[in-house]
Image: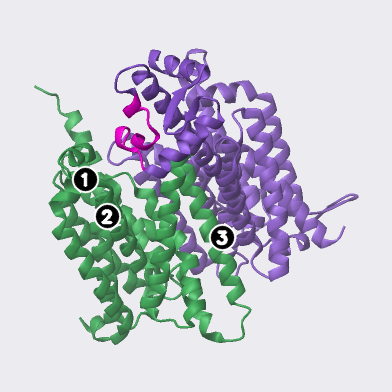
Amino acid sequence: MSSTMEVQLIAIVVAAACALPGVFLVLRRMAMMSDAISHTVLLGIVLGYFVTRDLASPLLFVGAVATGVLTVSLVEMLTRTNLIKEDAAIGLVFPVLFSIAVILISRYAGNVHLDTDAVLLGELAFAPFDRITWGWLDLPRALLIGSITLVLNLLLIVLLYKELKLATFDVGLAATLGFSPVLVHYGLMTVVSITAVGAFDAVGSILVVALMVAPPAAAYLLTDRLSRMLGLSVVIAVLSAVLGYWFARWFNVAIAGSMAMMTGVAFLLAFLFAPARGIVALGVRRSRQRWEFAQQMLTLHLLNHEGTAEADDECSRNHLSHHLRWQPRFAATVIRLAEQGGLIQCDGMRLMLTDQGRRLAQEASLR
Amino acid sequence: MELFADYTLRMVALGSAMLGIVSGVLGCFAVLRRQALLGDAMSHAALPGIVVAFLLTGQRDPLILMLGAAGSAWLAALLLMSVTRTTRVKEDSSLALILAVFFGTGLVLLSWLQQRPDAAQAGLRSFLFGQAAAMVARDVQVMVALGVPTLVLVALFWKQFKVLTFDPEYAASLGLPVRGLSVLLTSLIIVAIVLGLQTVGVVLMSAMLVAPAAAARQWTDRLGVMIVLAGLFGASAGVVGALISATARGLATGPTIVLCLGVLTLVSFLFAPNRGLIWRYTRQAVPQV
């Protein structure tokens, strides 16, 4: 397998693995936890290295996951003391833990291959050179770790789908049915930590955040079903990763950064063009409602004065802007639309309701 | 005081003190309005602006870079508001999203810049974790020129900001322009962030806003006292951290200042009268009459 292929495969696997737990982070309003965890796992890796003196030791992985969970519980502990609010607790805990890690690296591990740039950026381009050979198996380490996390996340979501869904959308009901919210919370956070640790070596902490949050947020605008949201998130994450990789290749720029940028583009597209919730769709719906409402007003006005003494005056084309306080051009458009829609008939200056228009006005007045 | 005779150290101390005061004061509003993480998102979002400002002008003048930083942080804040207001994506998701996407874009621009033959871009990387030792008189001048007007504005709008922070509905009922004041306050927070980028770095700047305010909150229930304390905490941690980092080998300034702040905050959480954990514990131990 060529190294280009391998890098893309790693990116695809990591993107899918991150997007899955990300869906629940977004739905449970804990997206910023991904930011905190993906930074603090560095401390676990550094401490694990000091104990084992071996960057390849599995203990580093365990240590990193443990620091991720520790971050979550520290934030909760601080919040529960009521000294500060949750957002301030997050904003306090992760910079401190991350700072400790950065200083430990620069003071005591300067000669080790563990630098802070790599933490933010990852080293996807070099990932194929770090290989694991095991019998006939010869794979990049990042691909193996990424695949394992992906399979683990998939399994957990398939097996615990109902429980996760319930605990996400109706905490109260979940608790009464006996699913401990604390257990679900910490379970999810452990999964997020494992995923972050598995991914961050290859793609860096910033891309972990981007992949965990942006694709699910985009999918959230596209669908109302949890299962579809999970699927869409994975598709969007994978597409962003591959496109980002080629963008980085073409312009010779940072791979992880360009993938993060692509997840942003994906969200922007969903934000603008999502069929029901996009900005464009919202704008179209709003302007349609505006014209529909104006036509309704017109029919109501005509019905009100139909057959009265002042009908000649009130129902004249030229007087609408005076009676309804409409701009002349706006009034002209409303009249044209209403006539096209068969709501009114024009007889020179005089406007008259059709049967359809009268029915609409009567319905509207009953509401 | 021999330490302060050194020109570089004097600059570093002055600059960090200014930064600590401004970010401490503005941080109080951010923390009380539950916008602590907004600072994190906006400081990350400043990175592409710094690089673009450099690309456009080719200069490393702090004022130009800060303007670029403020521009992209502003854009980020605007996007954040429009996403949370018009869609059902919640604030936490849009924060994380904007943070990661802007920062990623900044890294892309930075790596693109590094291919260029001129060496002028060399210092831009220090914006990630901050480098106080590189501070010169011009940096301090710019920091004072931006920081002092910011503090003056806070003093001028003191009452309005206070009521906006604690009771926005009441502020609206008084006929205050809540939206405009909110924008002004957010802009001032952006100024505080931008001031610190070169010293503390993009990644850890949020702690400069949150920690002094969180520490000061434990000692008092009055906004005025809290703000003065936060300014003091910010300034002292800034100066001490920056001096340690400027004199020791291999200590990036950002992490060092953040650790100083961390210690200060921990002490406040434990020992502050009335609210502190130890105070609370001893009071519980004494039987109530």
The span picked out in magenta is A312-327
| Type of amino acid under label 1 | Leu
On-image quarter of the C terminus of chain B: top left
Mark 1: secondary structure: helix
Render colour scheme: by chain
Circle number at residue B164: 1
Q: Mark 3 points at which residue?
A: B104
Asked whether B170 or A340 is in front, the reply is A340
Picture quadrant where residue A152 is located: top right
Disc 3 to disc 2: CB gap under 8 Å? no
| Type of amino acid under label 2 | Leu
Give how far across and how far down residue A308 sits, in percent: 32, 17
Q: Can residue A34 be seen in this view?
A: yes
Mark 3: secondary structure: helix
How many discs mark residues in the rendered view?
3
Q: Which residue is drawn at 41% across and 28% down?
A: A298
Label 3 – label 1 distance at C-alpha: 34 Å
- Per the rendering, the colour in which chain A appears is purple
Q: Which chain carries label 3?
A: B
Q: Mark 2 lies on which chain?
A: B
Give how far across and how far down residue A339 sits, in percent: 52, 30
Q: In this view, does A59 lie above or below A83?
A: below
Mark nearer the N terminus (2 vs 1): 1
| Type of amino acid under label 3 | Gly
Mark nearer the N terminus (3 vs 1): 3
Category of crowding for the residue at label 3, using alpha-carbon neighbours closer than 10 angstroms: few (below 14), some (14–19), many (at least 20): many
Figure chain in green:
B
Q: In this view, does A322 lie above or below A94?
A: above
Q: Residue at x 61, y 32 (%)?
A: A223
Q: Residue furthest right?
A: A136
Give how far across and how far down residue B122 sits, in percent: 52, 80
